[in-house]
Image (spheres, grey):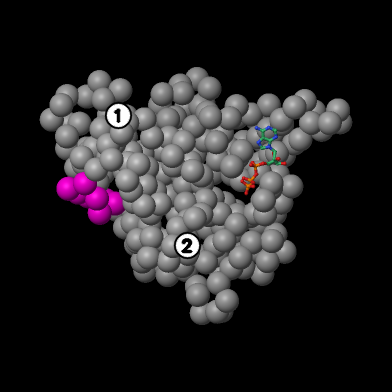
């Protein structure tokens, strides 16, 4: 469970003296296993908000707790429980090959070799990349890179996986492949948070949409209920009214 309580995040001082209030007094809880979308126009505070979930951004006010533990009291626990896939996965690769990169996190946890191998295989299996361990990351397509970044996060066995704009720059088959992987993760009980201003790919999978405007929560509801408010937040939603969340998907 991720609990955000009265969180405000500023860049460059207070709003009065030229700074930016990126997140403005936001409170919300994300239960385990939930598939949530954080939506909103460019600059509405999506990235800043989700980065507080595992301490990549420290709030100026308010608290974030993961599984009941304040993030600032135990960063390792928060980063183990909340896996993050950055907007550009190239920013998070640490090794040259697929297998070495996915193994990096579990190695840092000091796990036994057999357990590391198991985690790498399970994580690669979850993103359909088994057998690609020795491939060089530099040689992969955008969609394959995204999937390897997801595998790297999954190898830490997170309770929640947070993906920041996971579809940017992907072609249609790559998007479909990533969506399918996310759908499976949700089925298996991993909580997923997708940050996006284009909900069309994930609208049908989501349990909930948190729509931000100017750093505040403007809507927080299941997709079918949220849809009326979302175009006003300058986000793309499915065209057809029949594109409702598929409750039986899990
Ligand atoms: N490192 C930073 N330094 C200063 N201002 C920042 C920084 N990061 C974000 N901001 C500002 O904070 C506000 C919220 O940005 P944030 O990236 O959280 O929003 P976003 O909804 O994720 O936007 P995008 O969709 O463009 O990624 C914006 O006004 C942005 O310019």
- The residue wearing badge 1 is 104
Q: Indicate whether 57 appears above or below 176.
A: above
Q: Quadrant of residue 199?
A: bottom right
Q: Residues within 10 Å of mark 1 (few under 14, many from 20)?
A: some
Look at discs 1 and 2 and give the one toward the viewer: 1
Q: Nearer the viewer, residue 65 or 118?
A: 118
Query: Is the CB atom of the residue marked by disc 2 within 8 angstroms of ligand 1's nearest atom?
Result: no
Who comes first in sequence, dot 1 or dot 2?
1
Q: Position of residue 86 (x, y in %)?
A: 48, 41
Q: Position of residue 216 (x, y in %)?
A: 71, 46
Rendered-image quarter of ligand 1 = top right
Label 1 to label 2, Cα distance in Å? 29 Å
Is 98 positioned to the left or the right of 17 in the image?
left
Residue sitting at 43 percent across and 49 percent down? Answer: 192
Q: Indicate whether residue 129 is drawn in magenta.
A: yes
Residue sitting at 75 percent across and 27 percent down? Answer: 12
Residue sitting at 46 percent across and 23 percent down? Answer: 75
Q: Position of residue 157 (x, y in %)?
A: 31, 38
Q: Indicate whether 221 appears above or below 126.
A: below
Q: Residues within 10 Å of mark 2 (few under 14, many from 20)?
A: many
- Write down the region rendered in magenta: 125-132
Where disc 2 sits, the SS reads loop
Q: Indicate whether residue 111 is drawn in magenta.
A: no
Can you say which quadrant of the picture contains the N terminus? top left
Q: Position of residue 161 (x, y in %)?
A: 41, 44
Where disc 1 sits, the SS reads helix
- The residue wearing badge 2 is 202
């Amino acid at each position: 469970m991720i609990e955000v309580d009265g969180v405000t995040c500023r860049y460059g001082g207070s709003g009065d003296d030229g700074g930016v209030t990126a997140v403005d007094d936001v409170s919300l809880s994300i239960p385990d296993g939930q598939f949530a979308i954080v939506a909103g126009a460019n600059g509405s505070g999506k990235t800043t908000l989700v980065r507080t979930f595992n301490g990549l951004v420290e709030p100026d006010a308010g608290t974030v707790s993961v599984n009941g533990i304040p993030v600032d009291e135990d960063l390792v626990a928060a980063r183990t429980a909340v896996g993050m896939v950055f907007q550009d996965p190239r920013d998070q690769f640490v090794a040259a090959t697929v297998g070495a990169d996915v193994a990096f996190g579990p190695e840092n946890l000091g796990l036994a070799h057999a357990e590391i191998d198991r985690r790498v295989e399970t994580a690669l299996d979850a993103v359909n990349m088994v057998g690609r361990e020795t491939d060089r990351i530099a040689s992969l397509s955008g969609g394959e890179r995204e999937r390897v970044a997801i595998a790297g996060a999954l190898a830490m066995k997170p309770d929640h996986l947070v993906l920041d704009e996971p579809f940017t720059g992907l072609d249609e088959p790559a998007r479909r492949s990533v969506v399918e992987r996310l759908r499976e993760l949700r089925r298996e009980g991993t909580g997923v948070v997708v940050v996006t201003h284009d909900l069309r790919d994930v609208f049908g999978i989501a349990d909930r949409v948190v729509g931000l405007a100017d750093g505040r929560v403007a809507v927080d509801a299941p997709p079918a209920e949220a849809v009326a408010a979302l175009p006003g937040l300058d986000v793309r939603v499915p065209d057809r009214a029949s594109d409702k969340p598929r409750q039986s998907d899990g």
